[in-house]
């Protein structure tokens, strides 16, 4: 038992197990299906927060364009679902049956060639994971090899997010434009709108999220994680030690893009639509807020940060529709100013030490009473004294 506790403390799995209990037991038992589906939506953003912990917290590189990779993953899944919903029987009233409705509205008479691979679900999974990772590799290789970092890299990623948003909106006949892709109902004939489907998708999202946390924890505990921290703090010293800093940063940027793409795909499956409003600069900055509030050095903290910020966004927008943006700004500023290390810093610096001291106080052993030698009988004392004489 003590060995298991030591292992969990050293590996950081204790907080992961607590998170798993909260997501797999507490929420399903205490929330109705509508709220649970909302939590599943929030958890899809948590994938992006995990990627930012690895990229920003451990790699020292801030990206303000993670919505690009989130959107590419979401649009990849949406294209497959849209094609499935656009079979010739369902779309027989269109001018051109067998193509998505927004293409027919924009007088597109033939399915574009780059849409064809999304008829296959395995190819769709490969593309929705591969395309964002490839784009991250291209951007990272071009920037990091030229030692572009800091605020310049953040601005460039913002520009990429803006470019992709304009491209999606401008190519309305092929992407759905500003309305995005909607009316996504089935996955390989499985109706994703039923109550049982929503539960399955929620637990699938949680399982993928926990697996992602374990993967990132393994990276952090490995030599690669140590090098990432060293590059963040002393980049020149790592470079002079013979390591190619650019390659490591390209890797962690690609990892963050991959995680964001998984989150985008799960968002599309659970919500049933994808639009350019989830790709641009504003949602990308919100995703950074998730990691900042949760703690940019903590994977589990990033998940709690995504849950807290999105819950606050939902609650404030429902209760105070005219003031909710100001309240969200106040929440973010208050947390960052009061707790620079986020929720994880509050736990590590304030709560955990007090719990440890409390536990040590309760487990403090009681000192045994002092041993007092009993006086010897008079007869024995006389014999001893005679022998001494």
Image (cartoon, rainbow, N blue to C red):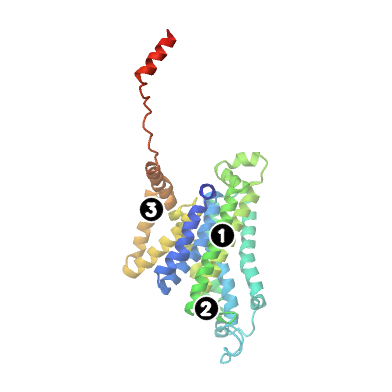
Q: Residue at x 41, y 60 (%)?
A: 308
Whether pointer 1 and pointer 3 mark residues with C-beta atoms closer than 8 Å, the reply is no
Residue 348 lies, with reference to residue 330, above or below; the image says above
Classed neighbour count for the residue bearing mark 3: other residues with Cα under 10 Å, few (<14), some (14–19), many (≥20): some
Q: Viewed as shown, does residue 364 lie left or right of 236?
A: left
Q: How dense is the environment of label 2, judged by Cα within 10 Å: few (below 14), some, or many (20 and up)?
A: many
In terms of depth relative to the viewer, which is nearer, 13 or 180?
Answer: 13
**Picture coordinates of residue 320 (x, y %)?**
31, 67
**Residue 166 at least partly seen:** no
| Pointer 2 residue | 192
The residue singled out by tag 1 in the image is 212
At numbered mark 1, what does the secondary structure look like: helix, strand or loop? Answer: helix
Q: Which residue is mark 3?
A: 335
| Residue 174, position as x, y percentages in the image | 59, 77
Query: Between marks 3 and 2, how big is the CA–CA gap?
Result: 37 Å
* Marked residue nearer the N-terminal end (1 or 3): 1
Number of the front mark, 1 or 3 = 1
Where, by quadrant of the figure, is residue 114 drawn?
bottom right
Q: Mark number for residue 325? A: none
Q: Quadrant of the C terminus?
A: top left
The residue tagged with tag 2: helix, strand or loop?
Answer: loop
């Amino acid at each position: 038992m003590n060995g298991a506790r030591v292992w969990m403390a050293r590996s950081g799995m204790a907080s992961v197990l607590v998170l798993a209990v909260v997501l797999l037991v507490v929420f399903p038992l205490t929330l109705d299906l509508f709220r649970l589906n909302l939590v599943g939506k929030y958890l899809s953003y948590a994938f992006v927060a995990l990627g930012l912990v690895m990229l920003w917290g451990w790699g020292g590189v801030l990206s303000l364009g993670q919505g690009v990779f989130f959107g590419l993953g979401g649009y990849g899944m949406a294209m497959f679902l849209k094609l499935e919903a656009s079979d010739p029987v369902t779309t027989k009233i269109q001018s051109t049956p067998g193509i998505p409705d927004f293409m027919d509205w924009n007088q597109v008479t033939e399915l574009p060639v780059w849409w064809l691979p999304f008829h296959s679900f395995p190819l769709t999974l490969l593309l929705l994971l591969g395309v964002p990772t490839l784009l991250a590799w291209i951007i990272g290789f071009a920037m990091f090899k030229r030692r572009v970092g800091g605020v310049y890299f953040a601005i460039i990623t913002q520009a990429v997010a803006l470019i992709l948003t304009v491209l999606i909106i401008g190519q309305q006949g092929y992407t759905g434009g500003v309305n995005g892709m909607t009316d996504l109902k089935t996955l390989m004939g499985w109706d994703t709108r039923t109550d049982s489907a929503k539960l399955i998708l929620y637990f699938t999202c949680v399982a993928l999220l926990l697996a992602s946390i374990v993967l990132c924890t393994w990276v952090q505990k490995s030599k690669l994680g140590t090098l990432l921290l060293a590059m963040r703090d002393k980049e020149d010293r790592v470079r002079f030690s013979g390591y190619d800093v650019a390659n490591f940063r390209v890797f962690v940027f690609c990892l963050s893009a991959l995680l964001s793409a998984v989150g985008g795909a799960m968002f599309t499956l659970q919500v049933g639509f994808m639009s350019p409003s989830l790709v641009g600069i504003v949602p990308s900055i919100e995703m950074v807020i998730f990691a900042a509030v949760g703690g940019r050095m903590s994977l589990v903290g990033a998940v709690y940060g995504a849950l807290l910020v999105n819950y606050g966004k939902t609650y404030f927008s429902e209760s105070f529709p005219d003031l909710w943006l100001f309240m969200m700004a106040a929440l973010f500023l208050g947390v960052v100013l009061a707790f620079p290390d986020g929720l994880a810093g509050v736990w590590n610096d304030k709560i955990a030490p007090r719990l440890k001291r409390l536990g040590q106080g309760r487990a403090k052993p009681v000192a045994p009473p002092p041993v007092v030698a009993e006086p010897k009988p008079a007869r024995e004392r006389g014999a001893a004294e005679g022998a001494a004489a």
